[in-house]
């Protein structure tokens, strides 16, 4: 097995993930908007005895707070939690990229080589369907490996939006994984794993296949040479396609992973389908594209940094 693809992909992914972490954190906060604040019910004892209610209380429905956008949430985080809060959970991001992205990038390159007539993946011209198939397989394996870090990352990013007394206050990704294992069982580390795998398959297939395909088209038509301009253009196209394809499942994944289970309590969602149905029923279909602006704002720069860095690392490692 050629390990060079894993090393190259891992280095590029860690740099891309760490540098775009604040945008990912804002995306998670936006995806959770409206979830824990559906029409709240508060009870007040009436002053008029003539009110005929079973327990002597009347209920008032209070509308959820208005949703705010990317810049507003970012500003609010900095004001209320400090600038360093934008990097909450960055240790989990680094671990996630080390496990998930290293695996998916390396495995994708191996499959490209295996399914191509060429030994060098740079010269391989695979049909688009084979690229997609390679992405689906690589994404599923990478997601299964990296799910514990993914759960820890979502929780650490979302912690600041909770009331102080309800925060988990994980000190690091190791502490997060350790506490989850002790308090909720080892199985909690793979909570939402089906969603993670599905999302990773969609993201990897759309992102890597689109990048390769667009890059090949640009070079074949002679629009640009094989340089930074080509890499950036192909990266933006890949980031856009991946964002559109993955956002709905990303919203559901975030909510399932973030749900807090109290001892003896009932889980907010029984599973991914239940979460999707409740989300659509209470917030509308477009709630599945909640956080899309920060998703594309993060996915664009992430994908550009990922592939531009990857191409440069490949040059360095070419003769190794």
Image (cartoon, rainbow, N blue to C red):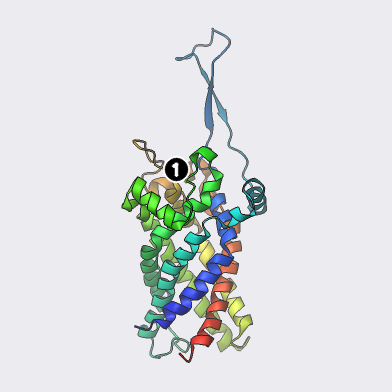
Number of other residues with Cα within 10 Å of mark 1, as a class: few under 14, some 14 to 19, many 20 or more: some
Residue 140: image location, x then y, percent:
37, 66
Q: Percent x, y for residue 42? A: 53, 26
In the rendered structure, the answer to whether residue 247 lies left or right of residue 131 reads: right
Given residues 154 and 226, the one toward you in this image is 154
**Disc 1 on helix, strand or loop?**
helix
Q: Nearer the viewer, residue 109 or 99?
A: 99
Q: Nearer the viewer, residue 44 or 95?
A: 95
The percent position of residue 189, horizontal first and vertical second, equals 37, 54
Q: Where is residue 18, by image quadrant?
A: bottom right
| Residue ID at (52%, 45%) | 284
Residue identifier under label 1 = 278
Above or below for 283 versus 70:
above
Horizontal relation, residue 42 to residue 152: left or right: right
| Residue at 51% in and 66% down | 242
Q: Quadrant of the image for the C terminus?
A: bottom left
Q: Is residue 103 above or below residue 28?
A: below
Q: Residue at x 48, y 14 (%)?
A: 53
Horizontally, is 184 left or right of 277 in the view?
A: left
């Amino acid at each position: 097995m050629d390990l060079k693809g894993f090393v190259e992909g891992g280095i590029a992914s860690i740099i891309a993930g760490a540098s775009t972490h604040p945008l990912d954190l804002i995306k998670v906060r936006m995806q959770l908007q409206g979830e824990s604040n559906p029409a709240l019910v508060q009870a007040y004892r009436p002053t008029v005895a003539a009110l005929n209610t079973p327990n002597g209380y009347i209920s008032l429905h209070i509308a959820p707070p208005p949703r705010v956008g990317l810049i507003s949430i970012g500003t609010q985080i900095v004001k209320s939690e400090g600038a360093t809060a934008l990097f909450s959970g960055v240790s989990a991001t680094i671990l996630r990229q080390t496990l998930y992205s290293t695996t998916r990038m390396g495995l994708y390159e191996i499959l490209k080589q295996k399914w191509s007539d060429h030994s060098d993946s740079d010269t391989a011209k695979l049909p688009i369907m084979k690229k997609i198939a390679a992405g689906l397989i690589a994404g599923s394996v990478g997601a299964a490996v990296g799910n514990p870090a993914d759960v820890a990352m979502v929780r650490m990013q979302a912690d600041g939006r909770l009331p102080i007394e309800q925060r988990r206050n994980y000190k690091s990704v190791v502490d997060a994984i350790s506490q989850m294992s002790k308090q909720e069982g080892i199985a909690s580390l793979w909570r939402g794993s089906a969603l993670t795998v599905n999302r990773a398959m969609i993201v990897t297939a759309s992102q890597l296949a689109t990048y390769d395909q667009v890059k090949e088209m640009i070079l074949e038509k002679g629009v640009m040479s094989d340089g930074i301009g080509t890499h950036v253009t192909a990266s933006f196209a890949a980031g856009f396609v991946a964002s559109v394809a993955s956002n709905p499942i990303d919203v559901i994944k975030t909510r399932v992973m973030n749900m807090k289970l109290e001892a003896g309590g009932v889980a907010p969602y029984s599973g991914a389908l239940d979460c999707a149905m409740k989300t659509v029923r209470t917030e509308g279909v477009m709630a599945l594209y909640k956080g899309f602006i920060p998703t594309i704002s993060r996915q664009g720069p992430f994908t550009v940094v990922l592939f531009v860095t990857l191409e440069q690392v490949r040059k360095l490692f070419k003769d190794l």
